[in-house]
Image (tube, helix red, strand yellow):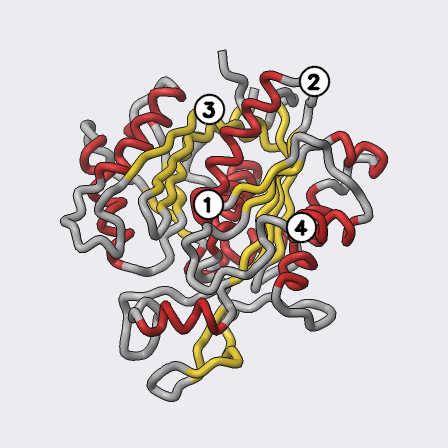
Amino acid sequence: MRPSLVILSTGLVSSVGLSAPATCAAIRAGVANPSETRFINSAGEWIMAHQVVLDRPVWGRARLVRMAAMAITECLANVPRSDWSLIPLLLCVAERERPGRLAGLDTELFAEIQRELAVEFAPASSIIPHGRVSAHVALIHARTLLGNSSTSLVLIAATDSLLSWPTLSVYERNERLLTAENSNGFMPGEGAGALLLGTERAPPQLACVGLGLGHEPAHIDSGEPLRGDGLAQAIGAALAEAGCAIHDLDFRITDLSGEQYFFKEASLAVARLLRVRKEEFDIWHAAQCLGETGALAGLVAIAVTDAACRKAYAPGPGVLYHAANDCTRRAAAVFRFETA
């Protein structure tokens, strides 16, 4: 039997808050903080983005390191520092297909974060380079680690930024950025997050009870007709693991960031699976406050879900989270908040 993954603590660094409580409160209130970047689009206008304000200006990989270290430190605040080296770190980063992807994410970033924190994480640590579906892949990996080894804790962290010209220029050229003339686009963002996972904790607790992955051949750049098969496959697999149907869940939280393609895909996937009429099936997307945050999106969704359930403003205890990469990867997870 697969162990349930329990969320023990969270950490977030975002454009609307430098901690998980601050970020989740801002998202709940619908607060956004976009600002002008250093980059200009083809119309001669400043590109707007959701930028993290740090205590000292750093750029490139050093910025990712700084944000990740802040989120991890918050997440592990209640764990003795002497025990950090016993915890595997699964580090979520941008997918290798990302245009303008920073060099060294697979080879240098992990070591740089360890140096920033002055710690070496457990040997079972690894890099998860799958962008917006990284959180799901990391959860699957974490479940394996917790079920097959002596470790009792696993740390998942993510750090990402779309705020570089090699990345923005490609999205701008392909008309994927949100502008005054283009409503079918996203606003780029950045940030970092961390989740500490275990298998046992006294309720109340948020537990991941189902995970699923899928493959979508009609990805956003394919030109093929979209049917939502890949996302439906991922959601169906997660529901099967959780032992429930989609109508048993209370709301959805997703990585949707403004592009019509992904909203259409989500609608098609749910339509394929929903067989019982629901009066309400709310859909949450933190990107309206944080922008497109890439590999961070999954951790934000989980942290927001945890906060919403603990503070009793979630529509109910059953939650579906789903995500989609620009390429073919699709993923879903079912969470349940347990009170007794």
Residue 53 occupies which quadrant of the picture? Answer: bottom right
Question: In the rendered structure, which disc, 4 or 3, sits on the residue that comes first in sequence?
Answer: 4
* Amino acid on which the number 3 mark rests in the picture: Val
Which tag is nearer the camera, tag 2 or tag 3?
Answer: 2
Q: In the figure, residue 149 lies in which quadrant?
A: top right
Judged from the image, the secondary structure of the residue bearing numbered disc 2 is loop
Whole-Å distance between the Cαs marked 4 and 3?
25 Å
* Numbered mark located on residue 71 in the image: 4
Which is nearer the N-term, disc 2 or disc 3? 2
Mark sitting earlier along the chain (1/3):
1
Q: Position of residue 54 (x, y in %)?
A: 68, 67
CA separation in Å, label 2 and label 4: 25 Å
Quick check: marks 2 and 1 in contact, CB under 8 Å? no
Tell me the kind of residue under disc 1: His
In front: label 2 or label 4? 2
Provide the residue designation for mark 1: 130
**Marks 4 and 2: in contact by CB < 8 Å?**
no
The residue that label 2 is drawn on is 150
106 vs 216, nearest the viewer: 106
Is residue 225 toward the left or the right of residue 119 in the image? Answer: left
Other-residue count near label 3 (Cα within 10 Å), few / some / many at <14 / 14–19 / ≥20: many
Helix, strand or loop status at disc 1: loop
Label 2 amino acid?
Ser
Helix, strand, or loop for circle 4? Answer: helix
- Find disc 3 in the rendering and name its residue: 209
Distance CA(mark 1)–CA(mark 3)? 21 Å
Amino acid of disc 4: Ala
Left or right: residue 90 versus residue 301 is: right
| Upstream in sequence: badge 2 or badge 4 | 4
Report the front residue among 176 and 17. 176
* Residue 328 versus residue 54 in the image, above or below: above
Question: Which comes sooner in the sequence, label 2 or label 1?
Answer: 1
